[in-house]
Each structure stands twice: as structure tokens, then as C-alpha cells.
Image (tube, rainbow, N blue to C red):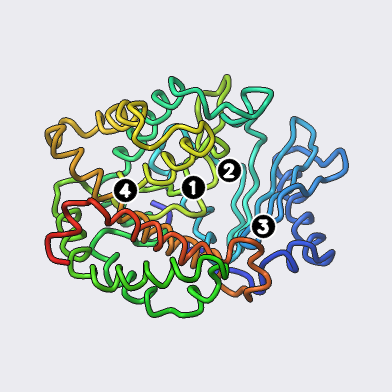
Amino acid sequence: MTSREPPTPETPNGARTWLDPRWRAEALAWVEATLAGLGRRVIGEVEHPHVRPWSTAMRVPASGGDAWFKASGPGPAHEGPLLEVFQEFCVAHVLLPLAVHPDRPWILFEDGGLTMRATRPDGTGDHDLVAWERILAEYAALQRSLEGQAAGAAMLAAGTPDVRPERLPDALERLLEAGEWWALIHPEERDAADGARIRLRASVRAIRAAAGDLAGGGIAATIQHDDLHGNNILVGPAGDRIFDWGDAAVAHPFGTLTTTFNSIADKTGLDLTDPAFVRLRDVYLEAWTNVLPQTALIELSVLARDLACIGKALAWERSFIGLEPDEMGDFGDSVAGWLMELADRLDGRAWAGRLG
């Protein structure tokens, strides 16, 4: 089992760092040295197509095929050590790294080919619901392979955030009082945000009870990607491989469906009540039918998908560590925005009315 500590993230981070020529030169020196150790070399101009407040990526033309360099800020800094845990536990359907820097949140990958989204020339690969059935079944098997004390301990030791259900209510109460996140809501949505905050404060007891039900429901915590959409899945001759684990946490597995289904609905135009999502849910839950009956799994999936909104808010909060509001781009409202979605989900939920 790997025993090295997760990296101490570099500061400052964000676009000002990623675009600093001195930082770029240092990063590329590591890339060149790492490739040289693999018997390869840089053979062309490095491209820098991805610059986000929380991470950046560069395409490196190299002998033997293109490589990708990724650097993260403090929030997603656990990604490299987490991928090393995946290597240790022989996890399938993951894009594994060529190298992970020993004390910086830097990773070097082989180019993985096309994403699911890019498999169609117009970028509508997310529309392939048959492919989604295959991928969700593979991903569920991946999650099940990392159940158990040894894997959980290794992932947490690697710095992977602990977002298990029992931690969510306290996190919600803290975020409800974190005025700096609510201040970033766009002016035209302030009234809706104020209303959501009031409803959530009134529902904390019900949310705490729901989190207890989810924690004690019989499904083991495991890795939860928390950003599984068509642009984070590679497809091709090497099989389906999931990448970009910077938002991942040790959590209830079913919460993954929140982002995945929201993304599919957004890209396809399907309503979340469409029968297609019932089919995708059931394909995904099939991996746990030896643990609980299907009806119980469905009930837990409702709780997990709703409460995962808190986990998403926490993921965004981590992404903004060390950044000023003007460095967050158009994403600064995301922490409060996910809590507003949770408030919207309370309407009509039987669990939300039990103690509220």
C-alpha cells in the first residue's frame, strides 16, 4: 500500500499562476524530465487549451504520442494520489497517469483519445443512451471494487475528501451561514436565493434525518466521481476510461447520478422525469441488487441524489480555495447555486416533510 503523503498544494493558484511564464517553465521542465525518464522527448510546441480557476492542462507533443500535463489548485490536489490508489487496487475503467509529482499537484497522462461527447462530429455524443447504459454499469462496478476498509482508508489517506452522508448536515449548516458564497449569487436571483436559504434552514432537521437514513441504509461508502459527464469519459479501442477525478470524494455512491443525470438532461433536452432516466438508474443500481432489493435501492437513490447537492456545493467550495471572487470567473455562484437546487428538490419529497 502506498504510504506517501498527499501533496502540499502550491499557492497561489488560479489563472494568474497558470499563465505565469515562470510557473509554466518550471512545470514544463518537470514534464521534459519525466518524459526523458520514460525514454521520450518533447517534439513540438506545447498547447495550453484549458485554463480554469482550479486547474489547468497542457497538451505536450511527444515522441511515442501526445501527453497531457495537468496542474491543480488546493481543492483538487488529491487527484494524483487518488489515481495512485487506483493503480494499487487495479481499478478498471480509469485513465491512469504516466507520472504523479511527489509533492506538487501535477500529473502527466498519455493522450486518451476521444471523449464520449466528441464521438459525434457535432459534439452530441452524450445523446447515446445505450453507451450511457454500458458506462454506468462499468462505473458502478468500479465503485463496488473500492468498497471496504482498506480501499477507503487508502483513499482518505491520499487526501480524498470525506463527504459521507453523516457529514453533510453539519456542512450544510455551515454553508448556510457562509454569507460570502450567497453574496456571489447574480442580482436577478437574489430573491430566489434568499427564499432557498430560508427553506433550507427550516428543513435542517429533516435533512439530518435523511442523511442518517442514507448513512445507515446498507450501501457502503466508496469513491464518487461527482463530475461524471460525457466530457470526462474516454471511449475507444482501450475501452471506456473515466478521468478528471478532482471533484471525487469518499461518499455514498448513488450521489453520482445527480451531476450525471443533470448533464445528460442538459445535453439531450430530455426532462429528468423522462423514462430514459428510469432505465439508466436501474442499469446503474443493478450492481447493488445482491445487497438490497431494488425498491430499497431506488429509495436510497432518491435520498442520495438530493443530498449530493450539498456535496456538489462542497466540491465547488474546495475549487475556490485561495482565490478571490474576481478570480472565480463565472463560477462563483456555484456553491450557493447547488444549495438552491437542494431547496428546489425539497418540494414534493416525502422525506423532506417528515420533520421539517
Q: Of the residues under marks 4 and 2, which one precedes in the sequence?
A: 2
- Left/right placement of residue 11 relative to residue 245 reads right
What's the CA distance linking mark 2 and mark 3?
20 Å
Q: Which residue is under mark 2?
A: 97
Q: Is residue 137 left or right of residue 49?
A: left
State how far apart marks 4 and 2 are (Cα). Answer: 30 Å
Q: Which mark is residue 52?
A: 3
| Residue 187, image x, y percentages | 57, 70
Left or right: residue 56 versus residue 40 is left
Q: Nearer the viewer, mark 1 or mark 3?
A: 3
Q: Which residue is mark 1?
A: 83
The earlier-in-sequence mark between 1 and 4 is: 1
Q: Return the residue at label 4.
A: 305
- 3 vs 4, front mark: 4
Observer-nearest of 27 and 222 = 222
- Residue 263 on image: x %, y %: 49, 40
- SS for dot 1: helix
Out of 292 and 206, give the one closest to the viewer.
206
Name the residue type under label 3. Arg
* Residue in the foreground of this view, choosing between 245 and 173: 173
Earlier in the chain: of badge 1 and badge 3, it is 3
Q: How far apart are labels 1 and 3 at the CA level? A: 21 Å
Residue 286 in which image quadrant: top left
Q: CA distance from mark 3 to mark 4?
A: 26 Å
Question: Does dot 4 land on a helix, a strand or a loop?
Answer: helix
Question: If the image is split into quadrants, where does the C terminus sit?
Answer: bottom left
The answer to whether one can see residue 330 in this image is: yes
**Labels 2, 3: front one:** 3
The answer to whether mark 2 and mark 1 are in CB contact below 8 A is yes
Disc 2 marks a residue whose amino acid type is Pro
